[in-house]
Amino acid sequence: MYRSHTCGELRIEDVNKEVTLSGWVQRVRDKGGMAWVDLRDRYGITQLIFEEGVTAPEVLEKTRQLGREFVIQATGTVVERYSKNDKIPTGAIEIKVSAIEILNAAKLPPFMIEDDTDGGDDLRMKYRYLDLRRNPVREKLALRHRIAQEVRRYLDEQNFLEIETPVLIKSTPEGARDFIVPSRMNPGEFYALPQSPQTFKQLLMVSGFDRYFQIVKCFRDEDLRADRQPEFTQIDCELAFIEQQDILDIFEGMVRHLFRMVLNQEIGDFPHMEYADAMRLYGSDKPDIRFGMEFVELNEVAQNKGFKVFDDAELVVGIKAEGCASYTRKQLDALTNFVKSQQVGAKGLVYVKCNEDGSFKSSVDKFFDQEALAAWAQTMEAKAGDLLLVLSGAKDEVRKQMNELRLHMGNELGLRKEGEFKPLWVVNFPLLEWDEETKRFHAMHHPFTSPKPEDMALLDTDPGAVRANAYDMVINGVEIGGGSIRIHDREQQQLMFKHLGFTDEEAKEQFGFLMEAFEYGAPPHGGIALGFDRLCAMFGGSESIRDYIAFPKNNSGRDVMIDSPALVDGTQLDELQIALNLKKED
Ligand code: ASP
C-alpha cells in the first residue's frame, strides 16, 4: 500500500491516526534539531515533521538526503500542529514520521514548481510534465475535465449518443489546409486528418442515429494565434428531424447548464442577431455585447458638405464614447495612432467633442459648422460630454476598422468586464463569401449548409445575397461555436457544388459517398460544433486556449517537449515510397 490518505485529506479530527502518504517533496526545512518536509500530491500539501531524539536516526538520515521533487512515502502519526497554517486545508496537523522510503530521487527541476514560478514560457513548455505539477496549471485541466463531464451529462440526458468517427479520412472542407498521412499499403495515396467529423456525422444521420455527439480532436493546418492550435477539440453534434430553432434551444440549454454547474452562474437568454445587423451595428460577426457603443451610419448628415474624404467614402460611420469629451490632445492622438496602426489600417480618425456648454469641437471644423456637427450629434443621440469617433471608407473595410476601435474603447473604458458573460446567437449568415484571391465564391460555413429556401432563386442572380440556415454562438466577442441546417437532397447538394466551382467529376470524386448516401433516405438534419478549448478558456477567464490543453504546441506548431515534428528514418520513407524534395532556404 503506497498510501492510506492523500496529501490534501487529513484534518484535526484525524489526530492520533497512523497514516501513510506518498507524494513529491515540495520543500525541506532543516533547522538542525528539527526538520520539516512539505509533501505534495494532486490533492494538496501535508507537513511532515522530524525531530532529533524522537525520530529514529535512520529516518533522519534519509530525510537529510531529500531534495525538491523527490518522490517519497512516509508513515507516521497525525499530530496537532503547534503553529497552524490557516492558508491550507491540512494546516492544523502534521505527520510525526516513523518511517520514510525514497521511491525515486529527482534532479533539481529547471524551474520552481510553485504557483508563481520563475520558469519562462519556453522552458515550461519543454518540461510541460513538470509545469503540470503546478496548482494553477493542474486546476485548468481539472476545470476542463469538469466541463467535459457536464457536457456528457447534459447531452446524454437529451438522448444524444457518443459515437467515435475515424481519424484517418479524406479531406473535409472546413476552409483550412489538411494534415495528410501517407499510406504504406497504398503507395502514393494519402489520408487526411479530419478538419472536423462533418461528413461522418451527416452519414450517422442517414443511418438513423438522430442525435450524435463527440468530444473530438480536429486538425487544421493554418497559421497559429493565441487561440488556435493545429489540433484542437470540438464538442461536435448532429441531429435529425429538427429545425434551426430546436438546435439553438438545445445548445443554449447546454451552455446555460455549464454556467450553472461549473461557475454557479445563471446567464440570461441568448438574443438572436441577424448577421447583417451584427455587421452593420458592430462591424463583426462576433460582437461583444457586454457594452453598447453601436455604430451609427452618418452618410446622410456628413456627406456633400465639401469634405472630400467623406464625400468619396462608401460609408461614414461613428461611435459614441460617453463622457469622453474631456479627452486631451494626447489621448486623441493616441486613438488616431491606434486606428492608423497596421493592425487597424485606417487612414485617419475624425472626432467631435460634445462640450458641456452645448458647443462642438471637431477635427473637421473647417468643413463642418456648429449646426452640421449638431446634426451628427443628434443622429448619434449624443449628449453634452460625449465624444464622437468617426471613420470613413469602403464599407467592409471601415466596419472592420470601427470594430477594432470599438473594442479598443471598450477596453479603455473598462466596459468589457471580466466575469460578466453576454452570449448571443448570430443567425442567417450569408451562404457564400467572395474570395478576391481565387475570384470565386466559397462556402462561408461549409458546402453542406442549406440555403434559406426563400433565397434559392438568388443563387443564379445574386449569389452573395443568399442567406444560409447557419448560426454561430458568440460569448463576449468570442465565437464559441457554429453550425447549420444541412442540405439532405442529392440534387441540391450537387447544385451547391456547382455554384462553388466544382465540376461534376470533382464533386463526385470528393463527396460522391455523401451524395450517394442522400439517395438512400437521408432525413432532414443539422448540427453544430462548439470549440471545447475556447469554452474552457472562457470559463477559466483566460484568452489563451493553450493553458487548457495538457500538451499544447507552440506558435510554430511544434511540440518542444517531444521535439515534433521531426525527420523520419530513411527506411520509413522508403517503405512509403516517398522521396523528399526540400527547397533550399535562401
Ligand atoms: N463542422 C463544422 C465546423 O467544424 C460545424 C458544423 O457545421 O457542425 O465548424
Image (cartoon, rainbow, N blue to C red):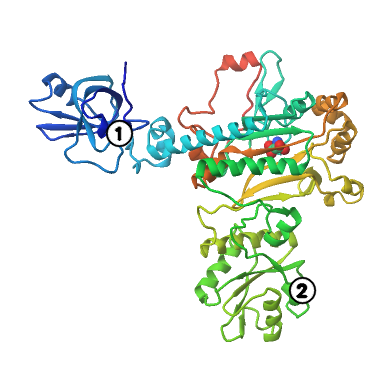
Split into 4 quadrants, where in the image is the N terminus? top left
Disc with the residue nearer the chain's start (1 vs 2):
1
Residue placed under numbered mark 2 in the picture: 311
Residue 101 seen anywhere in this rendered image of the structure: yes
Q: Looking at numbered disc 2 in the image, what kind of residue is underneath it?
A: Asp
Name the foreground residue: 241 vs 526. 241
Estimate the x, y position of residue 218 in percent, counting from the top left: 63, 32
Estimate the x, y position of residue 553 in percent, counting from the top left: 52, 35
Q: Is residue 485 left or right of residue 228?
A: right
Residue drawn where x is 83% and y is 40% of the image: 500
Estimate the x, y position of residue 431 in percent, counting from the top left: 80, 46
Give the label on residue 45, or none.
1
Mark 2 packing: few (<14 Cα in 10 Å), some, or many (20+)? some
Split into 4 quadrants, where in the image is the C terminus? top right
For residue 92, which quarter of the picture? top left
SS under mark 2? helix
Name the foreground residue: 98 vs 344. 98
Estimate the x, y position of residue 209 in percent, counting from the top left: 74, 25
Ligand 1 shows up in the quarter that is top right
Question: What separation in Å lies between label 1 and label 2 (alpha carbons)?
Answer: 69 Å
